[in-house]
Image (cartoon, rainbow, N blue to C red):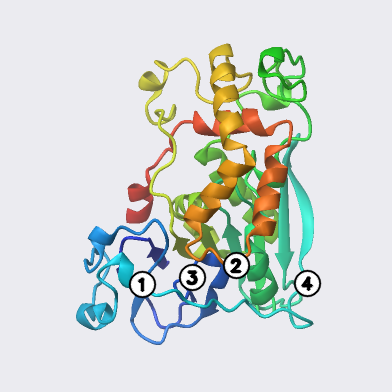
Amino acid sequence: MEVVSCSHSRLAFHQTPSSAWWFRGNGLGPGHAKLTRPRRSAILCLGTGAASNPGDSGKVQASRGFYVSDVDAALRGIPTKAGEIEKMIIPGLPEGPESSVISTGFWEWKPKLTVYYEKSGMENSKAPSVLFLPGFGVGTFHYEKQLKDLGRDYKVWTMDFLGQGMSLPREDPTPNNTVEELGEDAFWGFGQELQPWAEELVYSIDLWRDQVQHFIEEVIREPVFIVGNSLGGFVALYLAASSPHLVKGVTLLNATPFWGFLPNPARSPWLSKIFPWAGTFPLPSFVRKLTETLWQKISDPRSIQGILKQVYADHSTNVDNVFSRIIETTQHPAAAASFASIMCAPMGQISFEEALSR
C-alpha cells in the first residue's frame, strides 16, 4: 500500500511502485487534484496555504521508512520566504456536458444512525473506486468538483461523518429537552432522558473509522483508494492500518496528525475512568454552559467567514457554496451537542504515528 502525505510545512518524497496510482495536485488544495500515474519513482507533495511556516522553507523532512531522492533538484525554484510566493490564477475544473452526474443517498448503518453520501461515475464498472473523506466541519459538498471531474473515468464516493454535515441525527437523542438556559428550545442532546439508540454514542475517531469500514464493506463492496483531507486524512490512515484489505492506497491532503485529548478506554481503561465524561449523551450540565459560550462564537457567520479566509490561500476563490453549507449545518438542532461530543471524545486506539508505521 502507498501513502502519499502532503503538509503545508513539509516536503515529503515517497517511493511508489510504477503501477500505483496517486493524486497529483498543483499545490492548490483538494479542489484541483488529478488522478494520474507517476512518471518517476519519487513523488513530491508540496502544499501551499496561509498556514505555511516560513521558518520551515528549504528544509526536507523524511518520515522514517520512506525513500528520499533528488532533493537538490526538487528544491530549485521553491521560495525561501513567504513574501516571494506570487499570486496565481487558478483555473476551475471543467464544467459542462462532460462532467459526471452526482447522485445522492442515505445509508442506515445502525438504527437512527444514518449516513449521507454522494457518488458519481458508477457507469465505469471496471474502474477503481475512490473514496474522499472530508475535514472537520465540512462534508460531501467540499468535493463537488472532484466528483464531477474524476467521475468521468472512475467510481467516486464521498460521505459526511456522523455528527457532521447531513449525517446529523434526525431525532433528539435526549428528548426530555430542558435547556432554557441555552436560550434555544430547539437544541437537541441536552435533555435528561436517553434514547436506547444513543447509549454509548460518542462522535469519536473510532466511530468514524468503523463508519468508513462498514461503508466500504456494505455500500461500495470493493477495496478503494482513500483520499482524506484534514480529519478525513487521519480517518483514512487509521482505517488503512486497521483494515488493510479494504484499502488499495491512501492520499493525505494536509492530514491532521492527532485527534482527541482524553485517554481511550480500550487502550487506557484505568486512566479513562478518571474523567467523568467523554463525549457521551446526555451532556452534563457544566458542558451545556460551556457549549453555549463556544457555540455562539463558533457558529457566528463572521467567525466561519474568517476561518475560510485562513484556510483558502487564494481569497479570490468562490467559496459561497462551502460557506452556505457550513451555515446550514450549524442551524441543525443537533449541531451544538454533536460539536460538544466531538470536542470531548477520547483519542483513537492507535495514534497517527502508529497508523503511519503500519
Q: Which mark is residue 85?
A: 1
Q: Secondary structure at mark 4?
A: loop
| Residue 282 or residue 331, whichever sits in front | 331
Identify the residue at image location x=72%, y=20%: 174
Label 2 with label 3: CB-CB less than 8 Å: no
Q: Which mark is residue 101?
A: 4
- Mark toward the start of the polypeptide (2 vs 3): 3
Q: Quadrant of the C terminus?
A: bottom left
In the displayed structure, 114 sits above or below 276; it is below
In front: label 4 or label 1: 1
Q: Position of residue 160 (x, y in %)?
A: 65, 49
Q: Quadrant of the N terminus?
A: bottom left
Label 4 with label 2: CB-CB less than 8 Å: no
In front: label 3 or label 4: 3
| Residue 40 or residue 290, whichever sits in front | 290
- Mark toward the start of the polypeptide (1 vs 3): 3
In the displayed structure, 113 sits above or below 81; it is above
Q: Which amino acid, by three-letter code, is at mark 1? A: Ile
Q: CA distance from mark 4 to mark 2?
A: 16 Å
Q: Which mark is residue 28?
A: 3
Q: Quadrant of residue 333?
A: top right
In the displayed structure, 204 sits above or below 147; it is above
Q: CA distance from mark 2 to mark 3?
A: 20 Å
Q: Is residue 236 left or right of residue 114?
A: left
Identify the residue at image location x=37%, y=70%: 46
Q: Which amino acid, by three-letter code, is at mark 2? A: Val
Q: CA distance from mark 1 to mark 3?
A: 13 Å
List the residue tagged with mark 2.
130
Identify the residue at image location x=58%, y=54%: 134
Q: Position of residue 170 (x, y in %)?
A: 78, 35
- Mark toward the start of the polypeptide (4 vs 2): 4
